[in-house]
Amino acid sequence: MLVAGYDGDRPSRDVADFTARCREHYPQMFGDIAEHGEMLGGVVTYHQADSRRRDFHKLDRLPAGLVAAGDAVASFNPVYGQGMTSATLHASCLSKYLRSGPKPHDGPAHAYFDQVRVVVDAAWQISTTADIELPHVDGPYPPGYKVTKWFGDLLFRASLTDPVLNARLGRVTTMLDHPAALSRPGTLFRALRLGLLGGSRR
């Protein structure tokens, strides 16, 4: 199990602290597991304080034969569970690149990194948009942030009771769909109708 904190609230390696957090912040079953389950090892902490990306697609002089994937391209706040999914999608990009035809051994893999950028942009948008809302973060805020946040909050509230919006939001947060899917007219109008006028159902 994973517990998380931010700013001054940082989980420790203390088993009692871990158990208390599972009991306090999660449904009862998680507290029961933490208290009565057999631990396979000690509590491990993770302290990366930022999200990082390396934009290989912007390099003018990209070495031939270089392929990077996973955290070597971008790493995100682990709370959102994007690491393994991103790495898997990078592997899919590499497969598509290699299957698209013969590649010169002395040429850079620009087409591969262009495909990877789409994956990184999607994961980056999800994680940084959430991180920037934390109370101890004071920007800088991207253009249109207030409008994006307003609609995002509206969509999230509507998704709590509407199964259609819940499924669409879930597909984006689990990286099955690109975040742009949430800006489709049908989703926009549904969120506005349910969020502003009511009519959502459980």
Image: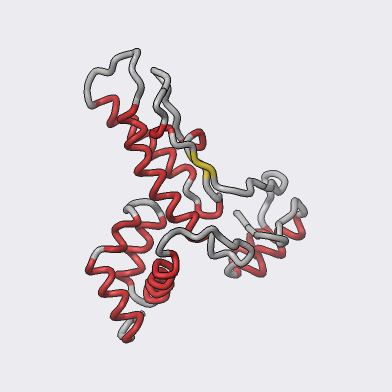
Percent coordinates x, y for residue 185 in the rendering:
23, 67
**Front one among 171 and 52:** 52
Task: Answer with left or right where residue 18 lies relative to residue 125.
Answer: right
Assign the C terminus to one quadrant of the image: bottom left
Residue 177 vs residue 180, the one in the foreground: 180
**Side (left or right) of 88 relative to 135:** left
Question: In the picture, residue 170 is in which quadrant?
Answer: bottom left
Q: Residue at x 36, y 68 (%)?
A: 166
Above or below, 131 relative to 78: below
Q: Position of residue 81 (x, y in %)?
A: 50, 51
Identity of the residue drawn at 35% across and 80% down: 195
Residue 56 is situated, as x and y percent measured from the top left of the image, at 43, 32
Q: Quadrant of residue 182?
A: bottom left
Tell me which corner region of the image, top left, top right, bottom left or bottom right, holds residue 65: top left
Nearest the camera: 139 or 113? Answer: 139
Is residue 150 shown above or below 96? below
Give the residue drawn at x 45%, y 58%: 142
Q: Quadrant of the N terminus?
A: bottom right
Q: Position of residue 194 (x, y in %)?
A: 32, 80
